[in-house]
Amino acid sequence: KPILVWIRRDLRLTDHAALSKAAGMGRPVIPVFIRDHTVDALGAAPKWRLGLGLAVYADRLAAMGSALVLRAGPAREVLERLLDETGADTVYWQRAYDPDSVERDTAVKDALRARGVEAQSFAGHLLFEPWTVETRQGGYYKVYSPYWRAVQHRGVARSLSAPAELSAPHTWPTSERLDDWQLGAQMRRGAAVAAPYQQVGEQAAQDRLASFARDAIADYRDGRNMVATDGCSMLSENLSLGEISPAQCWHAGRRAMQAGKDGAEPWVKELVWRDFAWHLLWHTPHIADRSWRAGWQTFPWNEDERTAEVIAWKRGRTGIPFVDAALREMYVTGRMHNRARMIVASYLTKHLMCHWKIGMDWFEQCLTDWDPASNALGWQWSAGSGPDASPYFRVFNPITQREKFDPDGAYVTRWIAEGQTDPPGTALGYFQAIPKRWAMTPQDAYPDPVVTAEAGRKAALDAYQNRDF
Ligand code: FAD
């Protein structure tokens, strides 16, 4: 009898416990991807990026004589129909940890087991299962440093080889067509300008890891902060869709540490931040919904998305060059440098006094590396409302940050065309991506600041006076 392997955000063949287990059973394997409500709910850019990833993954499976069966509908119904159609009696998948997926997967597992189906989930999206990292008192960690100390010497298993073979069933169940799903429909700028910035699929991810570990990891300690250069791995895009496993990254990082490369430990620590974010989302799912610290839940943020300030922020028209460059970079490429994420988040939540959820939701629409845990934690960290957050009274100054992390202005010049005679954006094609009404061509005037660095800082600090956070 065939085995169904339910593929989700794990578009790889190596270090894929569910596929390996299925392949090792010597029975036909049917990989299936389901477009259910969790896929339909994705933001424009991550949904588009998922479509790119699925296309490459389907080709990869086809090249080894297998296939990716695509079906749309509620997961449980789709799986039950496929079990009936194929005669399969087993379903395997890799675990997900966000509240929506957990609820769905629990219901699916119960329903399948009630039918006598073997339904089993496997680890792989994280380095450490969230319930396996406990404080001495038996609780979860709320602060990163002790979390790091608790896990840094743990063993992390991974398998580098892909299954040699995935036996095909006698007859393949019918599959819907990926093109018909139109996963890129809300991302019209995707094919035109964002596509060259994506490195899609398992092979691209492995190449990225190899070249980063060879060329850049040694200098990561400083290199990671320079916004105009490639000092980071850019693997978040691939990790988000499981095109590479965190365990594979962890081992590459540890090898670099053993080889004495200075930047390797800080890089592994960043990778562990990703796990820590999932640890928190698992134990406190409300981290993506409301301020983690109670004192912030009554803070009078602006929560109206339609204000001129919010619109200017989203469009990269705040009049603060570093902030605007970063927001334009994200809109055009689907990426934003980590340092820049902190600056734009600080500006929105502190200078403009807007709720962090407005920014979190915009990132969810625009980032091709969107990850619900890191996004929620990143926003709450920046706003000062989260666990282990940046101190709330620390207001990043976007002018001095620019001087430090974009000293020759290359980043700002790349993304702010106004007033330039031959801006690099012309060659990069980004004017095609940005709607004309956003007025960002070289002929447009660059706006005055919505709120200056000094005035915003003062207003924020005044608003924090006499509050109990
Ligand atoms: P590298 O510097 O090469 O780091 C290696 C890996 O470590 C990354 O791929 C990522 O998986 C992990 N990592 C690095 N920094 C962090 C961090 N601060 N928190 C958690 N994990 C980290 N990351 C996402 O993947 N998706 C998001 O939606 C996301 N939203 C964010 C929102 C805000 C407001 C902030 C401040 C940060 C956010 N981050 C998010 C974290 C971080 O910005 C990105 O992971 C990083 O920029 C990815 O680039 P890289 O792959 O080159 O990272």
Image: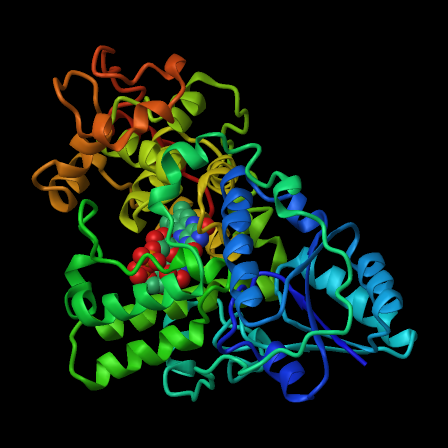
Residue placed most toward the observer, 151 or 396 = 151
- 188 is higher (above) or lower (below) than 238: above
Whether residue 5 can be seen here: yes
Residue shown at the point (56%, 55%) measured from the top left = 54
Tell me: 177 left or right of 468. right
Quarter residue 457 falls in = top left
- 262 is higher (above) or lower (below) than 382: below
Tell me where residue 192 appears, x and y as whole percent.
Answer: 40, 32
Tell me: 23 left or right of 412. right
User: What's the coloring here?
Assistant: rainbow
- 363 is higher (above) or lower (below) than 148: above
- 72 is higher (above) or lower (below) than 269: above
Residue placed most toward the observer, 280 or 393 = 280
Ligand 1 image position (quadrant)? bottom left
Residue placed most toward the observer, 386 or 22 = 22
Q: State the count of labels.
A: 0
Tell me where residue 127 appears, x and y as whole percent.
Answer: 47, 76
Residue at the left extreme of this rendering: 408
Residue shown at the point (77%, 57%) measured from the top left = 174
Tell me where residue 375 appears, x and y as whole percent.
Answer: 47, 50
Residue shown at the point (32%, 72%) measured from the top left = 268
Residue at the right extreme of this rendering: 115
Tell me where residue 356 appears, x and y as whole percent.
Answer: 47, 39
Tell me: 108 left or right of 293. right
Tell me: 466 left or right of 408. right
Whether residue 388 can be seen here: no
Quarter in which the N terminus is drawn: bottom right
